[in-house]
Image: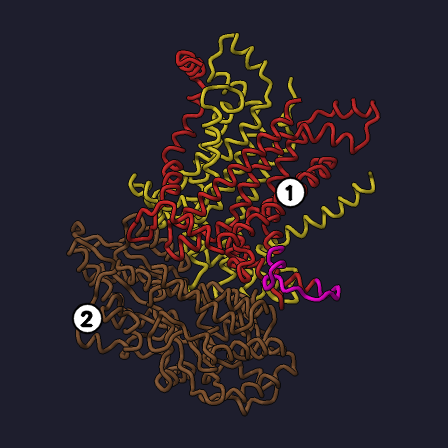
Amino acid sequence: MAKPRVEITFWGEASVQFQNSIFTEGYKKLHPEVKINLEEIPSQNIREKVMIALATGNSPDVLGDYIGRLGNWANQGFLASLSGTLSVEDEKDFMSSVLNQFKIDGELFGYPMRYWVISYMVNKSILDKVGIGDIYPGTDFPLKDWMIIAKKVKELGYFATCFFANGRSGDYWMLTNFLIFGANLWENGNYKETTLNSGKGVMALEWMIDMVKGGYAPSGVAGITDGDYLNFMNTGRSVMQGRTPGTALATETLFDNGLLDYIPDFRVVGTPHASGILNPPLFIGPSGYVVFKEDDTEKLKTSIDFAKFVTSKENSKKVCEAYQQLSARYSVRLFEDQKCFLVAQKLISENGVGDLGLSSPHYLEVRDAQFPELQAAFMGKKTPQQALDDFAKKIRNIWKEK
Amino acid sequence: MTRGNLFHRIWKERSAYFFILPTLIGFLFFSLKPLIEGIRLSFYEANLRQQVFIGLDNYSKVFQDPFFWLSLKNTFLFVVVLVPLILFISLFIALVISKLSSFWQSFFKGAFYLPAVSAGVVMSLVWLWIFNSTYGLFNYILSIFHILPITWLGDDNPARVAIIIVVISWVVGMKIILYSSALAAIPKSIYEASEIDGANSWQKFWNITWPLITPMTIFLLVTLTIGISQIWEAIFLLTGGGPHYATTSLVLRIYQLGFLYFRFGEASVYAVVLLMIVFTIAFFQFRYLNKKLEF
Amino acid sequence: MKLLFYFSLIVLIFLAISLLFPLYWMFKGSFEMMGFAMKIPPFFLPHNPTIQNYVNIFIQYPVIRWILNSSIVAIFTVGMSVVFSCMAGYAFGKKDFPGKNILFWLLLSTMMIPFHITLIPLFATMKSLGLYDTLPAVFLPSACNAGGMFLARQYMSTLPSDILDAARMDGAGEFKIFTLIVIPISKPLVAALSIFAFVGSWENFLWPLIISGSNSSRTLTVGVATISCAGGAMIDLGIAMSGASLVALPLIIFFFMFQKYFTKGITLGGIKG
């Protein structure tokens, strides 16, 4: 066997569903002269490892991760520019709303692979049980209908939804509730000033606190974790919330694993909207692959080639199926027979994609700054206006730092 | 002391240096550089890309940051509550089980030690479930006694109590084992002699037991103070420093500044301050209790 | 006094059971399929007990390799740490030499720096020594642990000096004295140091995670974390719990093997002669 001419390092997310060695072995077959050092790292530790590597002057060559963390490295200038490396048809094949998140000032820094989408879902089985199964919401879900459902399920001891503020991640789940009143983190792509403390945002937070007081959502929000948030609906204690459509496909697993004693019917519906507010957009969170800057041009070329291989159509299909996420490529059609994903995609095409600023500088700091303020509001330590204003102040301070 | 005298002493005791040599080498390779780096960076504004010397500006910045004082206060709170509490609990338990048969001693030591072997991510999931306000085990038990549920992690002081409970469960086992071995070292004859003099249980403890276990007490006191001032895992996994910063400790803040915001200079300032405070406390603990040792 | 004793005993039993509870829950959960572990009202005995989780772990992942790595790291950590701690503790506890106090506090101060600060420089050192992704890189930093040295010092400082002086007058060398006299009467210390070193090394997560890359140097704790998360929300709790149980089991076995040395104490409280 020929001695490897080029050696590159590839760091991927360790996952139960998917082994990254499929990529390395597949590529080796095509390019036997390339040696790929694979490291699979638990996703909650990837950022630490990359940071420590960078702090000591090392880095992997190719990295696969969630955009929220990749944005870090891009914004600090560690990534190689991938502009112009895609063929025209390839570039057109990637969804623009996803590809744009991998661009900073027009420069492409990564190839997208898959993305999750947060859509609002209801447990129709409970609605049937309670007797309102026939009026369950469709793709237009006015808030007043939400309240009707909430009141009816409360009578039988269910929570309508769940809020949480003790999260290490999962900001998008809570932000979906803000979307109900038309409020979001950012407007017009300006990541220096948040718009969450606008009148709409304050109304949203006040509504959430009222829902908790009224018993429609569990109390002690400041201590509820993101895992709890999902568990409430997974164990049939709450009826509706924003989450990934893939859950509708996993209901049998929930039953087999004893979380529920029946197989529930989860349906994707439109995100609720208060009166006067248009149908809210959906949040998406892509994951992709980036290449680190490299002086050795041979290595750089190989790394880019490898990253392209990984995000090619065939590989993309395999990965997305395993993760039960949608592919960033138009040509890769998945879950075509699954109503939940079809509805979600329809909602995206009709209402657009919400801007989380995932690849903005300081995204992680912004996410970190949210939860303590939400905690203060839910604990009653601050009024919603105060909490959100303090959040806005924190963001201004974050920008002042650099 | 003249120079000649010093060299003479070094030569005379040269064997001592060989005994500490391995530890010293390890220190030089693996601990000295981090120590120096940590102190050095505190004078720089440093992120992943560059380091700029700004001298004491970092310190003034940190001292004006309300989060610094907040995390200092929380850390202080944990130390003041946990150190005496753990010492007291472990000594008390060690005393009680010292009267039992060897089998029961092992059982209890095992029971208290085992929680320490399972600290980690999975165990904190179990603890999160125990402390859950709505469907957690604690509140379930409380409801059996018709007590209102407590929002454990959702409220300032309950969250601190939760952290305290978890840390005690992880730490107390080792201390009990150590105190047990210290107690077992005291010859029974001393107690018997004092009984002849008519000493009661309390006098036996205060005049015999307590002084004789002082070296162990010193060790536990100092290492506990050092350890508790640095708790991180329990806080990060259970409350993330919340709710609303109620449990943010100095080390948690160091983690945030260094690992999340890439502000290494400020993180180093926190570390230097922590080092100086803990060092001072440990030094005085050592001196005070060592004096007691000379009887 | 008797009443207080019996009351304390009852409290103790209650405490012991409460503290054991989370551990029991984790073991129980490893024998159940995911969701039953955290149900309320709780199942106190395993519901539909199954070994499927363990089967899954061993079949799908190189768990044996991880256990082997953890074992090698543990053996070296315990061996080096116990020997070095005893040596240094003996010097600090029983000898007097210039610079003793300065060196002692210098070494002790290494415990006072949060690990997050030492992480990056330590990583840089290892990388420059070419030890990235090797087993020595995992165990070397813990081999010179100041806590062990401190405990050894406390212990040794209370050993009777006359025996040592007598041996010196008989012409025995320092090293002979150490190995033939000091160590044999320090069995409880060695036992305590061994167990602390073993537990610390076996449970260590952050450093092995950072310094290892592939399965060749991956330890059990890191491996379990790798398979516990699914890059998102729901993790396979069953696998996670069985993985954590695998980590805990050797520690429990080790404890029961060594614990008899704890019941015999020797002078750790200042008695001379």
User: Viewer-nearest of labels 1 and 2?
Assistant: 1
Q: Is residue A247 above or below residue C70?
A: below
From the viewer's perspective, is residue B187 above or below residue A195? above
Task: Please tell me the colour of chain A.
Answer: brown
Q: Quadrant of residue B224?
A: top right
- Mark number displayed over residue A86: 2
The span picked out in magenta is B142-161
Q: Which residue is mark 1?
A: B84
- Closer to the camera, B121 or C27? B121
- Which residue occupies the extreme top position in the image? C170
Q: Is residue B31 left or right of residue B222?
A: left
Vertical arrangement, residue A193 with respect to residue A74, above or below = below
Rendered hue of chain B is: red
Q: Amino acid at mark 1?
A: Pro
**Other-residue count near label 2 (Cα within 10 Å), few / some / many at <14 / 14–19 / ≥20:** few
User: In the shown orientation, is residue C58 left or right of residue A35?
Assistant: right
- Residue drawn at (65%, 27%) of the image: B292
Name the element at disc 1.
helix
Q: Say which chain tag 2 marks.
A: A
Secondary structure at numbered mark 2: loop
Q: Colour of chain C?
A: yellow
Q: Is residue A102 visible?
A: yes
Q: Residue at x 37, y 38 (%)?
A: B36
Q: Nearer the viewer, residue B142 or A390?
A: A390
Q: Position of residue A97 (x, y in %)?
A: 30, 77
Q: What amino acid does circle 2 point to? A: Leu
Query: To which chain does the residue with label 1 belong?
Result: B
Q: Picture quarter containing residue A322?
A: bottom left
Residue B143 falls within the magenta-colored stretch: yes
Is-magenta flag for residue B11?
Answer: no
